Amino acid sequence: MKATSLLIISSLAFPTSVLAQKPEIQPVRVHVFTAPTEGGFVDVNSKQRTDSVKDLQRNISKKKTAIVVEDQSLADITLEIVGREHIPTGDTTSRGFTTLSWGIRHHTETTANKLGTVHIALTVGSYSTPINGECGETQLIGCWGTAAKDAAGKIEKWIKDNHTRIPRK
């Protein structure tokens, strides 16, 4: 009876949820950048990539698996914003209106649906893999921030899946 009571009390003192918790992943240091244009000139594409660097840094800094560092030599992982674009999905959306005034006027506009996509190269040592962040085809405002948030989620998953293989500096 005393042994049974001791077992029950010890079970209550150490809930199984505490014993079953996964150990926390040690955060990796991440450097986010984009390559400058040839000659250091600023153009529309370089400005867009620079905006995506800021969006991705902001989203990565919210993750428990990574710490954003400014110095690339201190980083365990580098994330290069390679570009961003709208990729056609193959679907279309039709919008139209009808006006009744001295007759009927009908106007329909069909547009191709596109996904806003940020292209990122994740690099650890000599290993590199592409990661794409996307925003929905109907999102008009804040698309690139949403695409960076999507990419940050994919990067976090990659870090969790590979945390034991990432060499630390």
Image (cartoon, helix red, strand yellow):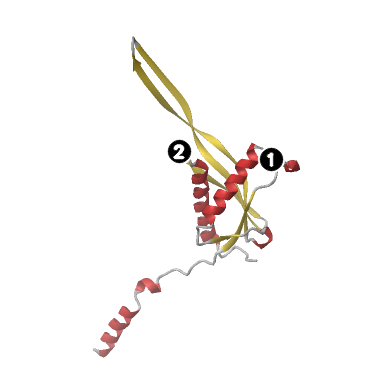
Residue 11, given in percent of the width and then of the height, sits at 32, 79
Position of the N terminus, as image quadrant, is bottom left
- Is residue 45 or residue 124 the one in the foreground? 45
Q: Give the residue drawn at x 35%, y 17%.
A: 99
Residue 139: numbered disc = 2
Residue 42, given in percent of the width and then of the height, sits at 69, 40
Q: Give the residue drawn at x 56%, y 43%.
A: 118
Which quadrant of the figure has residue 2?
bottom left
Q: In the image, is residue 146 above or below residue 19?
A: above
Q: Give the residue drawn at x 53%, y 57%.
A: 61
Q: Is the residue marked by circle 1 packed among few (<14), some (14-19), or many (20+) residues within 10 Å?
A: few
Q: In the image, is residue 154 above or below residue 94?
A: below
Q: How far apart are marks 2 and 1 (CA)?
A: 27 Å
Q: What element carries label 1?
A: loop
Q: In this view, does 53 lie to the left or right of 113?
A: right
Which quadrant of the figure has residue 66?
bottom right
Q: Do the residues labelled 2 and 1 touch (CB within 8 Å)?
A: no
Q: Give the residue drawn at x 55%, y 50%.
A: 56
Q: Which amino acid does label 2 sit on?
A: Gln
Pick out the residue farthest to the bottom: 2
Q: What element carries label 2?
A: loop
Residue 157, given in percent of the width and then of the height, sits at 50, 56
Residue 42: numbered disc = 1
- Counting the numbered discs, the total is 2
Q: What residue type is labelled 1?
A: Val
